[in-house]
Structure formats: C-alpha cells, structure tokens
Amino acid sequence: MPLAPTEFNDKIKRSEKVREKSEKALDRANKATDEGRLNRENRFLKKAARLENRSIKIEERENKKTKKK
C-alpha cells in the first residue's frame, strides 16, 4: 500500500478515522471489563464517547462543505 493516496478518491474521511479510533477504545474497554479492571474500563468508555461525539461533529462539518460546493 502506498504511503500517500494516489488519487483524491483514495483518501479516507477524517470522521471515519476518528470513528475507527472510538471503536478501538470501545474494544479495549470491553477487554478491561472482562479482566475486571473498572477504572480502566471507565477511562476507555469515556474516551470512546468523546471520540464518537467528535466524529459526529466532524461529519456534519464535512457535509456542510460538500453542500457549499
């Protein structure tokens, strides 16, 4: 896989990147739950919620930009 996108269509949207990060944090929280580590679980759940909110806001901004064009 090339380091940089070869065409503009290959570029992943920023909102999708942030959403993937939130899913990873949620997976880590679930793993911490299985291990019985409550503080770690809470930390990752809060992080996943913040990232999810951020991805929604970014997606709304991206949609506004495409409508203007």
Image (tube, rainbow, N blue to C red):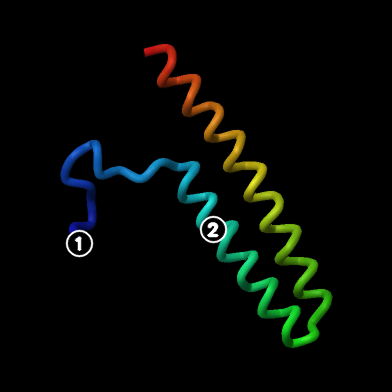
Q: Which residue is the site of mark 2?
A: 21
Residue occupying the point 50% across, 42% down: 15
User: Residue 13, how many percent across, how many down?
Assistant: 40, 41
Residue placed at 45% from the left, 42% from the top?
14
Q: Quadrant of residue 45?
A: bottom right
Label 1 Cα crowd, 10 Å radius (few <14 / some 14-19 / many 20+) = few
Callout 2 amino acid: Lys
Q: Secondary structure at mark 2?
A: helix
Residue found farthest to the top: 68
Residue to which mark 1 is pinned:
1
Look at the numbered disc 1 and give the secondary structure of its residue. loop
Write down the quadrant of residue 10 in the picture: top left
The picture places residue 57, in percent across and down from the top left corner, at 61, 34
On the image, which quarter does residue 6 sit in?
Answer: top left
Locate the C terminus by quadrant. top left
Quick check: marks 2 and 1 in contact, CB under 8 Å? no
**What's the residue type where badge 1 is placed?**
Met
| Residue 21 rendering spot, x and y as whole percentages | 54, 58
Mark positioned earlier in the residue sequence (2 or 1): 1
Q: Residue at x 57, y 60 (%)?
A: 23
